[in-house]
Amino acid sequence: MAEPVYIFSDGTLKRKENTIMLETQSGKKHIPVENVSEIKIFGEVDINKRLLEFLTQKNIIVHFFNRYGYYVGSYYPREFLNSGMIILRQAEFYLNSVKRLELARLFVEGSLKNIINTIKKYNENGRFSNTINAIESHIKNLKQCISVEQLMALEGNAREIYYHCFDNFVKSGDFHFEDRSKRPPQNELNALVSFGNSLLYTTTLSEIYKTHLDPRIGFLHTTNDRRFTLNLDISEIFKPIIVDRLIFTLINRKQIKKSDFHEITGGISLKENARRTFVQSFEEKLKDTIYHSGLKRKVSFRTLIRTEAYKIEKHILEDEPYSPYLG
């Protein structure tokens, strides 16, 4: 079964007959192409045109991260499933302010409801009841928003309320959230959130690639000079239940400690060993299966992400109204 390949070492990635070969100081590693669903590169890796042609032929996306572990861009092969009709419908929904606002509101609603579901996991003795009530009031106010900008502002306010609970969710005095900071993050918890979100954004992009949708046309996030936006929309729904819960687990199980971070220019970043630990746990989480009442079977979280894209596709074709996944 094809799976993501993560490359942390420096070296050269090339095509070797019908396989992908990674050359590093430690030696050569052959990777059968049929075993690769996507490639995520964290090391300083040289690639050439011959490899890119091979990856395009095999429909394999490559995601690039900088030396601090933060996403910088993707090699997105030509779309092999894109439908002209679907793209036109996406554009129509984006340009129609009512239809766009409806979809954007559903993304925010799904995100905030999953935030509440995450908080409830830690709501012993009702200690976070006021927080839950505050976020529920934000959900009620979504109907009053008359623009996407208002929706994003409301979501941002709700997330600030949520973030202030993080220190209580982790059983370590070494981690303090303070305020959300990025590019670069200013403390350890923020570094974990940024890293985890980057992994989720790229995973969602890879799953969209397997559908008829165009990832450049989002609805909550503005389609502009940014290369991809639909993956950001869908990821909003899954960040609380995949990334945030994983962070709390890794810290509470002492799999990631304060010593796993180092200072970078202007901020904080994970050391390579901590990135590897996070990535391994992230992939294990994506393989976890849960029962899906709509599909009437158990599916993995990775499948859930792709299913979310299919649901959006049905929505814009007006076959079935979209309803965000709640976990």
Image: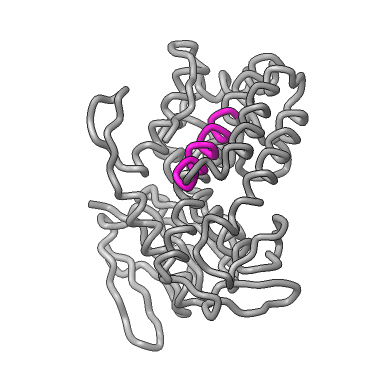
Name the magenta segment's main secondary structure: helix
The residue drawn where x is 70% and y is 60% is: 178
In the rendered image, residue 198, in percent from the top left (x then y), is placed at 55, 55
In the rendered image, residue 79, in percent from the top left (x then y), is placed at 46, 39
Q: Is residue 64 visible in this depiction of the protein?
A: yes
**Quadrant of the drawing holding the C terminus:** top left
In this figure, what is the number of numbered marks? 0
Display coloring: one colour
In the rendered image, residue 296, in percent from the top left (x then y), is placed at 24, 25
Q: Residue furthest top?
A: 319
Q: Residue furthest bottom?
A: 25
Q: Is residue 301 above or below residue 247?
A: above
Examine the structure image and report whether residue 112 is included in the region drawn in magenta. Answer: yes
- Give the extent of the magenta segment: 109-123
The residue drawn where x is 63% and y is 18% is: 102
3 sits to left or right of 61: left
The residue drawn where x is 53% and y is 68% is: 172
Examine the structure image and report whether residue 275 is included in the region drawn in magenta. Answer: no
Q: Residue furthest front?
A: 125
